[in-house]
Image: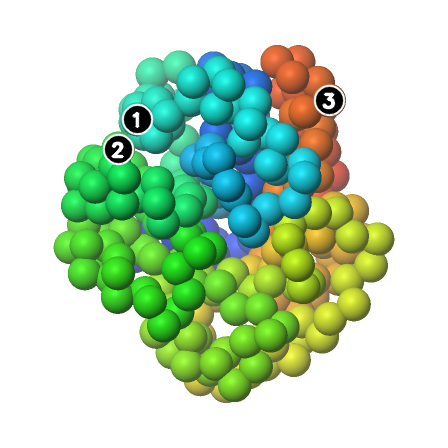
């Protein structure tokens, strides 16, 4: 059983839903990103999504776009983040090795510019478990399927309220976990989740036992608890990235405290 499967299995055994945290790699700098991941695992995060900064992150709202710009201005590269993951897996800069699954959220151009074969090989060697590529739709997943399979990297699929009849098709071939988008539009904090997430997840569960995690718009413990009640876990990104944007290199403790409150709500 791989690390992603283990994370969801462990959450299911304790009746606690999985907490997935997104941060933009290199914001405000690589050293702080590394410290944030260590602190968040200690606070209860079960799986990480690390954004590779990109100049045109089409699926992201303003908060994450600004974080991407800050990381790019600091010169953060995919190699910097791969090397960071390798350090986290070795325990080089922490009291213990990071054992939670680590995925990269990136865009197709970044992978192809790096070289998809070389990128996935390095992901495997450094300890990355999966990739989420928002601008490669299900119909084009073969662009990465062969190389992901070759190196044991889960290509994590997304379903949205607009997926409708495609939901079951996507679910049947999903790997790792299924990223269930809770709202229309780009990432960002919402006061209220207005779409019927439960309906989407019921369609998935009719054809697959793949774990379903809900993301986009979740920011409060109450929202996290509500979304976890119909899913296997929740994904929180913008709310964490916003704290990092406010506190910069002093964001580790505020993020740790925020993550701990969300984790408590899922217990």
Coordinates of residue 240 in the picture (x, y in percent): 66, 35
Q: Which residue is mark 3?
A: 246
Density class for disc 2 (Cα within 10 Å; few <14, some 14-19, many ≥20) is some
Check whether the beta carbons of the residues at disc 1 and disc 3 lie within 8 A of each other.
no
Residue at horizontal 34 percent and vertical 57 percent from the top: 155
Taking depth in this image into account, of 141 and 100 the one nearest to the observer is 141
User: Could you tell me which quadrant the N terminus lies in?
Assistant: bottom left
Q: Which residue is mark 2?
A: 126
Coordinates of residue 230 in the picture (x, y in percent): 66, 70
Q: CA distance from mark 1 to mark 3?
A: 26 Å
For this orientation, the residue located farthest to the right is 191
Vertical order, 259 against 182 (above or below): above
Q: Nearer the viewer, mark 2 or mark 3?
A: 3
Check whether the beta carbons of the residues at disc 2 and disc 3 lie within 8 A of each other.
no
- Mark 2 and mark 3 lie on one chain; the one further toward the N terminus is 2
- What label does residue 132 carry, if any? none
Q: Which residue is mark 1?
A: 79
Vertical order, 204 against 255 (above or below): below
Instruction: Choose top left, top right, bottom left or bottom right for residue 177.
Output: bottom left
Coordinates of residue 71 in the picture (x, y in percent): 51, 23
Residue 113 in view: yes
Residue at horizontal 46 percent and vertical 55 percent from the top: 134
Check whether the beta carbons of the residues at disc 2 and disc 1 lie within 8 A of each other.
no
- On the rendered structure, is 42 left or right of 169? right
Coordinates of residue 223 in the picture (x, y in percent): 77, 55
- Mark 2 and mark 1 lie on one chain; the one further toward the N terminus is 1
Residue at horizontal 62 percent and vertical 42 percent from the top: 237
């Amino acid at each position: 059983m791989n690390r992603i499967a283990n994370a969801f299995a462990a959450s299911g055994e304790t009746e606690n839903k999985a907490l997935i945290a997104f941060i933009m790699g290199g914001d405000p700098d690589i050293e702080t990103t590394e410290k944030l991941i260590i602190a968040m695992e200690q606070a209860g995060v079960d799986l990480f999504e690390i954004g590779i900064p990109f100049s045109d992150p089409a699926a992201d709202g303003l908060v994450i776009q600004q974080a991407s710009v800050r990381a790019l201005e600091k010169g953060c590269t995919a190699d910097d983040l791969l090397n960071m993951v390798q350090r986290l897996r070795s325990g080089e800069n922490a009291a213990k090795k990071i054992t939670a699954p680590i995925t990269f959220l990136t865009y197709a151009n970044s992978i192809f510019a790096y070289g998809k074969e070389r990128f996935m090989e390095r992901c495997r060697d450094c300890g990355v478990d999966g990739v989420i590529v928002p601008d490669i739709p299900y119909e084009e997943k073969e662009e990465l399927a062969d190389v992901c399979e070759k190196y044991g990297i889960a290509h994590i699929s997304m379903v949205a309220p607009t997926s409708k009849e495609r939901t079951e098709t996507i679910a049947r071939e999903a790997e790792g976990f299924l990223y269930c988008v809770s709202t229309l539009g780009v990432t960002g904090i919402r006061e209220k989740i207005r779409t019927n997430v439960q309906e989407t997840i019921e369609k998935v569960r009719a054809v697959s036992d793949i774990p379903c995690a809900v993301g986009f718009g979740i920011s409060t413990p109450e929202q996290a608890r509500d979304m976890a009640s119909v899913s296997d876990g929740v994904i929180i990104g913008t709310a964490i990235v916003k704290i990092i944007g406010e506190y910069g290199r002093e964001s580790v403790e505020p993020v740790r405290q925020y993550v701990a409150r969300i984790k408590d709500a899922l217990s």
